[in-house]
Image (cartoon, helix red, strand yellow):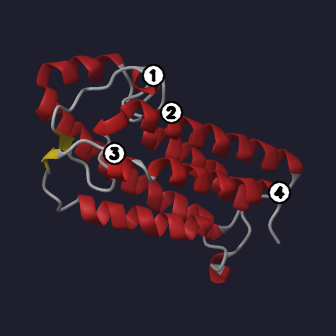
């Protein structure tokens, strides 16, 4: 049986998906597609992570890890909603420069450094990771934590690919931006 916290967490992911959907049709034309050797496995690993995180049929891995109480539920739901909100803010700030499943540069690609991009270089990934942590805590199962781990590894691969891509595309401007901001966690990392 799902708690009200779990139900809200599931709905928050649905909202994120609905915000993402128009981006597939409204982004700029692609100008550069870097080597796909790591991007496809990273995207597949992220998909597997979401299956483990969100699929309630993972009965064989439904061993409880996190206690199910109101305080944990509220705290984890707050992390989930804050992460979803931050990822949506990042997606909207990126606008038509967004790539989707495969990291690319677009025609007339801009190095966005405003909004959440003034706080961290990868706010979409930061938000998704925070939401995954919140969801894993909310669900509290071994499967959800395996999903979180898979998602973390996939996102780190994607972050490194995008860092190289932006460095190549924007050279000194990206290096200056990199020195001013953190990768995923404000003021820390």
Label 4 near label 2: C-beta < 8 Å?
A: no
Crowding near pointer 4: few (<14 within 10 Å), some, many (20+)? some
Judged by depth in the image, the label closer to the viewer, 4 or 3, is 3
Query: Residue at horizontal 80%, vertical 67%?
Result: 2
Image quarter where the C terminus lies is top left
Q: Position of residue 168 (x, y in %)?
A: 11, 34
Crowding near pointer 2: few (<14 within 10 Å), some, many (20+)? some
Label 2 near label 1: C-beta < 8 Å?
A: yes
Crowding near pointer 1: few (<14 within 10 Å), some, many (20+)? some
The quarter of the displayed image where residue 55 is located = bottom right
Mark 4 to mark 3: distance in Å? 34 Å
Q: Does residue 133 lie above or below 94 as drawn?
A: below
Write down the residue under mark 2: 89
Of 61 and 53, the residue lying toward us: 53
Q: Is residue 42 left or right of residue 175?
A: right
Q: Earlier in the sequence, mark 3 or mark 1?
A: 3
Mark 3 to mark 1: distance in Å? 20 Å
Query: Residue at horizontal 43%, vertical 66%?
Result: 47
Q: Position of residue 151 (x, y in %)?
A: 46, 57
Q: Mark 2 falls on what kind of element?
A: helix
Label 3 near label 4: C-beta < 8 Å?
A: no
Question: What label does residue 4 carry, if any?
Answer: 4
Q: Position of residue 93 (x, y in %)?
A: 42, 30
Q: Mark 4 falls on what kind of element?
A: helix
Residue 156 in sight in this render: no
Write down the residue under mark 1: 115
């Amino acid at each position: 049986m799902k708690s009200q916290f779990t139900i809200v967490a599931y709905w928050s992911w649905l909202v994120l998906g609905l915000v993402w959907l128009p981006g597939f049709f409204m982004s700029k034309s692609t100008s550069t597609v870097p080597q796909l050797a790591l991007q496809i496995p990273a995207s597949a690993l992220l998909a597997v992570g979401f299956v483990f995180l969100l699929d309630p049929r993972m009965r064989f891995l439904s061993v409880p890890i996190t206690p199910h109480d109101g305080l944990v539920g509220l705290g984890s739901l707050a992390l989930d909603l804050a992460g979803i909100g931050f990822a949506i803010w990042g997606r909207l700030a990126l606008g038509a420069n967004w790539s989707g499943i495969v990291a690319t540069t677009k025609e007339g690609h801009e190095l966005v450094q405003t909004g959440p991009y003034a706080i961290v270089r990868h706010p979409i990934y930061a938000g998704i990771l925070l939401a995954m942590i919140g969801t894993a805590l909310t669900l509290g199962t071994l499967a959800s934590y395996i999903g979180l781990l898979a998602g973390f590894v996939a996102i780190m691969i994607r972050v490194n690919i995008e860092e190289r891509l932006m460095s190549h595309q924007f050279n000194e401007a990206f290096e200056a931006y990199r020195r001013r901001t953190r990768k995923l966690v404000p003021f820390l990392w």
